[in-house]
Image: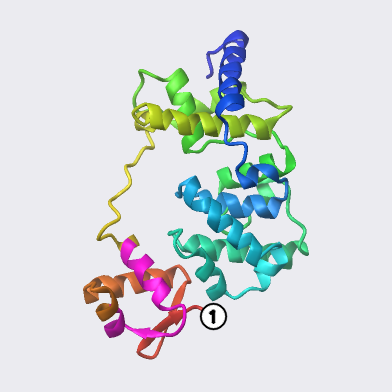
Amino acid sequence: MCMIDKRTIQKFQKKVYSFYESNGRHTLPWRKTKNPYRILVSEIMLQQTQVDRVIVKYQDFLKAFPTVKSLSNASLSDVLKLWSGLGYNRRARFLHQAAQYIVQKHSGNFPNTREELQQLPGVGPYTAGAIATFAFDVSLVMIETNIRSVFLHEFFNTATKVSDKDILPYIEASQDTENPARWYAALMDYGTFLKKEYPNPNRKSKHYVAQSKFKGSLRQVRGTILPLLFEKERTVAYIMKATGFEKKKIETALENLSNDGLVQKNGRGWGLTS
């Protein structure tokens, strides 16, 4: 149960909006549109990826695939080539599948409710809420890492192992129902600032998990292998020689990529899924 009164809420909102007016990231390209397709692209790209890395890829992606229909009609290999460098490549496949789902199931018309949006591949509760909020100005309760940071810092500063269930009532109580997109943008920007200025507030969260090292990880092997398959199929022997990774790691990575629907085996070679 949320224990803050109306005056405290108003003071908190004023603080967040004051920061946003002076320091908000108002020029981010996805902040300048209400197009749900463009917002979907930005939200999928921003999952586990820093904003600075996303901006250029986002712009290049939309030049290549300006509409949901153009993305739906594209080959997976073309989508993966443009995605290369962002990491977590299965997000590209999810985005491709989401575009095909919208064209096939909704005749190209974007669903506008959280429930319908969560039917899209790769779209969970937060991403669905973000699209509904930023594209359709729907006021919803939602949480992600930067939003969580704000509420942990402001209302749970001395606590540990805080559950999202404890935070959600505070998010609900402080919503700006008249300007939900502006409010959540302000929260995210303030949260980004807090994580730079203070020890990561998310360490107070019950759900916090430190990210594993990239070097030598399966993520690195996967990310190194995939671009090798853009132009043609490759054998495990070729990949070993090109990357220097050991055979077992390469085979595990290829199996992992195959399970994600990104690659397939054809005889002795491996190539992108058609």
Direction from residue 140 to residue 83 in the image, left or right: left
Query: In the image, what residue occupies the spot 61% across and 8% down?
Result: 7
Q: Position of residue 104 (x, y in %)?
A: 72, 68
Q: Residue at x 64, y 25 (%)?
A: 175
Q: Is residue 50 left or right of residue 4?
A: left
Q: Looking at the figure, which quarter contains the C terminus?
A: bottom right
Q: Quadrant of the rendered structure where residue 223 is?
A: bottom left
User: What residue lies at 58% left-to-right and 27% top-to-bottom?
Assistant: 20
Q: Is residue 148 visible?
A: no
Q: Is residue 51 left or right of residue 186?
A: left
Image position of 201 with respect to 107: above or below? above
Residue type of the residue flagged with mark 1 = Ser
Q: Is residue 94 visible?
A: yes
The percent position of residue 28, horizontal first and vertical second, equals: 60, 43
Q: Position of residue 139 (x, y in %)?
A: 69, 33
Residue at point 44% right, 85% down? 232
| Most distant residue in the bottom direction | 267
Give the dominant element type of the magenta stretch: helix, strand or loop: helix
Q: Nearer the viewer, residue 109 or 119?
A: 109
Towards the viewer: 10 or 100? 10
**22 relative position to 113: left or right:** left
- Residue 23 is situated, as x and y percent measured from the top left of the image, at 55, 28
Colouring of the image? rainbow
Quarter of the figure with residue 198? top left
Above or below 92: residue 262: below
Q: In the rendered image, which residue does mark 1 sit on?
A: 274
Q: Residues in magenta?
A: 220-239
